């Protein structure tokens, strides 16, 4: 049970809590239904968080940002990720952690901070896409962002800077820059500042990594949840569903998050390229001969880089 520390104003997630449960506005054309709690599951291990003590968030005064972390046996880096969220200077933050049934001490870390986590659950799942989908169904925020265990926000004012000047009614995507780091945390590279987004970049790569991307809940309500059949590129496929009528993107020259090179797709380049290609073909984002040419070009560049190394 969450205790009195839930009102501790040191944390981004506890400065704007209230006891009034917000209304979940459901439109007739919504693809899925939001909820404050997950449905009962006989395989559930544990759950907790602010919502169980009657504390909720709303976006009445300023946009609510929902941060979702999916984790499985991630005790090595999870605390670092959690603290990067809780230490944000932006006030209206909702934090959801979906654990896949960890057995390595991950739950001890989550419980340490559950007085500042809106909702957390530990139960077996069908992979990252399934975990992300659970988080989205629980989200009340205007925008949703995903941080894997080991990832995290670049600075304490990352959220404050990324949301400044944004209009939640019209802006469906906000994209910032990311810092790619090795497992030890040292910088490998910074993504470039891009003043204007061109959807054609998605034909070649995932040009908006999810660590730096804030997606409106409206987008999920229109285009649905992640496809659980994708192992590595579920976020990429989710964007390509809207390729032919792609919303405008607010590009921010803000280094938002750190992306650690230890995830499921690390050193799985060929598997990722294969999934990329399948996703592009399935969503018919370009004529098939063009997609073949792009795939061959991608494999050629990969081979050259391997030879050089």
Image (cartoon, grey):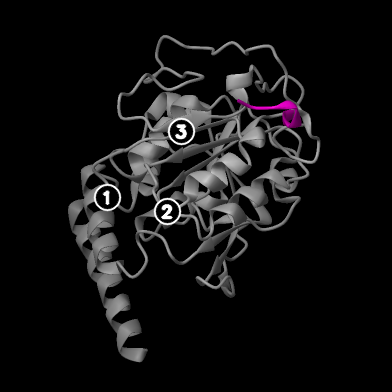
Of tags 2 and 3, which is closer to the observer? 2
Up/down of 13 relative to 281, above or below: above
The residue carrying pointer 2 sits among few (fewer than 14), some (14 to 19) or many (20 or more) residues within 10 Å by Cα, namely: few
Q: Position of residue 165 (x, y in %)?
A: 75, 38
Q: Position of residue 164 (x, y in %)?
A: 75, 41
Q: Secondary structure at mark 2?
A: loop
Q: Position of residue 152 (x, y in %)?
A: 59, 54
Q: Secondary structure at mark 1?
A: helix
Up/down of 142 relative to 39, above or below: below
Up/down of 286 relative to 204, above or below: above
Give the residue drawn at x 39%, y 14%: 29
Quarter of the picture containing the C terminus is bottom left
In reply to whether residue 287 is colored magenta, the answer given is: no
In whole angstroms, how far apart are the C-alphas of marks 1 and 2?
37 Å
The residue carrying pointer 1 sits among few (fewer than 14), some (14 to 19) or many (20 or more) residues within 10 Å by Cα, namely: many
The residue carrying pointer 3 sits among few (fewer than 14), some (14 to 19) or many (20 or more) residues within 10 Å by Cα, namely: many
Q: Which mark is residue 104?
A: 2
Q: Secondary structure at mark 3?
A: strand
In magenta, the rendered stretch is 1-6
Q: Nearer the viewer, residue 112 or 7?
A: 112
Q: Is residue 193 visible?
A: yes
Report the residue marked by disc 3: 121
Q: In which quadrant of the rendered view does residue 270 lie? A: bottom left
Q: Nearer the viewer, residue 168 or 272?
A: 272
**Direction from residue 62 to residue 203 in the image, left or right:** left
In whole angstroms, how far apart are the C-alphas of marks 3 and 1?
33 Å
Report the residue marked by disc 1: 280
Up/down of 148 relative to 92, above or below: below
Badge 1 or badge 2: first in the primary sequence? 2
């Amino acid at each position: 049970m969450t205790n009195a520390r839930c009102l501790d104003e040191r944390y981004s997630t506890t400065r704007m809590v209230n006891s009034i449960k917000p209304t979940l506005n459901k439109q007739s054309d919504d693809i899925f239904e939001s909820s404050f709690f997950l449905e009962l599951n006989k395989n559930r291990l544990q759950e907790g968080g602010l919502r169980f003590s009657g504390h909720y968030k709303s976006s009445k005064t300023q946009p609510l940002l929902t941060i979702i972390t999916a984790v499985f046996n991630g005790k090595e880096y999870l605390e670092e990720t959690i603290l990067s969220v809780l230490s944000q200077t932006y006030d209206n933050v909702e934090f959801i952690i979906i654990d896949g049934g960890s057995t390595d001490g991950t739950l001890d870390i989550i419980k340490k901070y559950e007085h500042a986590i809106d909702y957390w659950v530990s139960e077996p799942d069908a992979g990252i896409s399934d975990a992300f989908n659970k988080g989205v169904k629980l989200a009340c925020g205007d925008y949703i962002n995903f941080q894997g265990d080991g990832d995290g926000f670049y600075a304490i004012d990352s959220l404050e800077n990324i949301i400044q000047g944004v209009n939640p009614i019209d802006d469906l995507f906000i994209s910032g820059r990311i810092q790619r780091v090795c497992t030890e945390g040292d910088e490998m590279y910074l993504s470039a500042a891009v003043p204007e987004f061109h959807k054609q970049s998605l034909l070649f790569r995932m040009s908006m990594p999810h660590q730096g991307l804030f997606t409106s809940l409206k987008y999920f309500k229109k285009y649905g949840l992640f496809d659980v059949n994708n192992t590595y590129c579920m976020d990429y496929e989710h964007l390509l569903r809207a390729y032919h009528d792609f919303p405008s993107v607010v590009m921010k020259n803000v280094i938002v998050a750190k992306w650690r090179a230890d995830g499921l797709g690390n050193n799985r380049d060929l598997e990722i390229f294969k999934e990329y290609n399948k996703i592009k073909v399935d969503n018919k984002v370009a004529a098939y001969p063009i997609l073949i040419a792009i795939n061959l070009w991608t494999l050629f560049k990969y081979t050259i880089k391997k030879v050089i190394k």
